[in-house]
Image: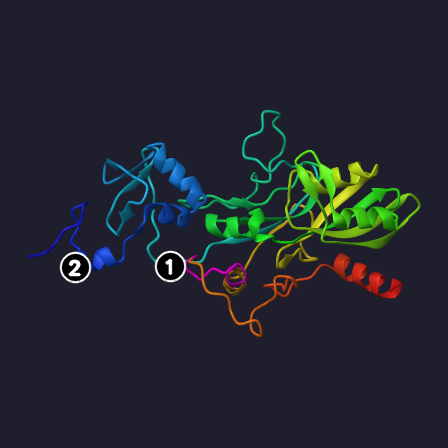
Amino acid sequence: MPRYSYMGRPLKVRPEQLEEQSERLHKVLATAGLGSRRDMEQLILEGRVSINGQPAQVGDKVKPGDVVKVNGKPVRLNWKVQLPRVLLYHKPEGEIVSRDDPEGRPSVFDNLPPIRGGRWITVGRLDFNTEGLLIFTTDGDLANRLSHPRYEVEREYAVRLIGALDQEKMDALLAGVPLDDGLAKVESIVPAGGEGVNQWYRLVIKEGRNREVRRLMEHLGLTVSRLIRVRFGPLAMPSRLKRGMKEELEEQDVESLMRWCGLDKAGQPVKPEPAEHAGSREGQTPATKVGHPYRRRLSQRSERQS
């Protein structure tokens, strides 16, 4: 006698096999691109998620054949292991990193490709007057691994200042300066040339607080006239990516990025590789063979100066 699912369709596997395929609800929703696992747990707590017509509870599991709705709308669940999508975008100045803006300013989301049954999640942010590399993904856990402060993922910037930093001020930035939200510091900072009062520097931070680089410089009495993010973690902005352009990573590059973040293809945490095989976080080994000519020029200048 055939067995049937909740929807009345014949089951292709036995119920006990379906149970083996079950997954935590908040994880499945995050995999569908609706947000991070923490966001999905909050949706469930607010009573906005149902399973087969019944209110869902935190910790519930779902399996193939179950009907899951969020805010009353069915969600397409992907049971086949699929890699998340990752998109690189060269954000120009004058765009806001938000879907809704009361002032009606241009948004980075305006020209992103549509996603069926999911959404693009930003990895970190850039303020309105900052340009450079912005990363989008469909996986909330991957976004969290890259952007949460506890993972200390490097963000590299090229910053142009009105005025120069002397050694005392650079030492202060490396040691840490007090801001209104706590002590902040840079991991490294090197001069990168310039003309007249406009001086370029290359610096690395690990937190990504709101307007952190600008506030650090304001604390030292200097003004940032231009700020460009050229690298986020293992991903450097390709030279071919001009302002306003976007580029999606190939599957092998997404796999490399997930391994670098300590995740397998299904988004599950994996044990770290032996030191001789693993890419060092301290060295920020790129997951893809991309580079930015501006960074290469800065490195060459630094080598000549040393």
Q: Residue at x 57, y 71 (%)?
A: 275
Which amino acid type is shown beneath numbered disc 2? Arg
193 vs 156, left or right, is: right
Q: Provide residue 276's location: percent of width, then percent of height.
A: 58, 74
Name the spot of residue 286 as percent of width and height, x first: 62, 63
**Disc nearer the start of the sequence (1/2):** 2
- Name which quarter of the figure residue 112 lies in: top right
276 is higher (above) or lower (below) than 36: below
Residue 237 shown left or right of residue 219 in the figure: left
Cα distance in 3D space between marks 1 and 2: 21 Å
Label for residue 304? none
Query: Does the magenta stretch mainly form a helix, a strand or a loop?
Result: loop
Establish if 30 lies above or below 13. Answer: above
Which stretch did the figure color magenta? 258-267
Label 1 crowd (10 A; few <14 / some 14-19 / many >=20) = few
Q: Is residue 92 magenta?
A: no
Q: Is residue 34 visible?
A: no
Mark 2: which secondary structure? loop
Position of 264 with respect to 63 (left or right) is right
* Residue at image point 16% right, 47% down: 8
Furthest-bottom residue in this view:
276
Q: Residue furthest right?
A: 196
Q: Write down the quadrant of residue 280 in the picture.
A: bottom right
Dividing the image into 4 quarters, which one contains the C terminus? bottom right
Identify residue type, mark 1. Val
Return the x and y of residue 89 as percentages of the image width and height. 62, 49
Q: Nearer the viewer, residue 274 or 142?
A: 274
Is 183 or 142 nearer to us in this picture?
Answer: 183
Residue 136 pos. (x, y %): 55, 48
- Circle 2 residue: 14
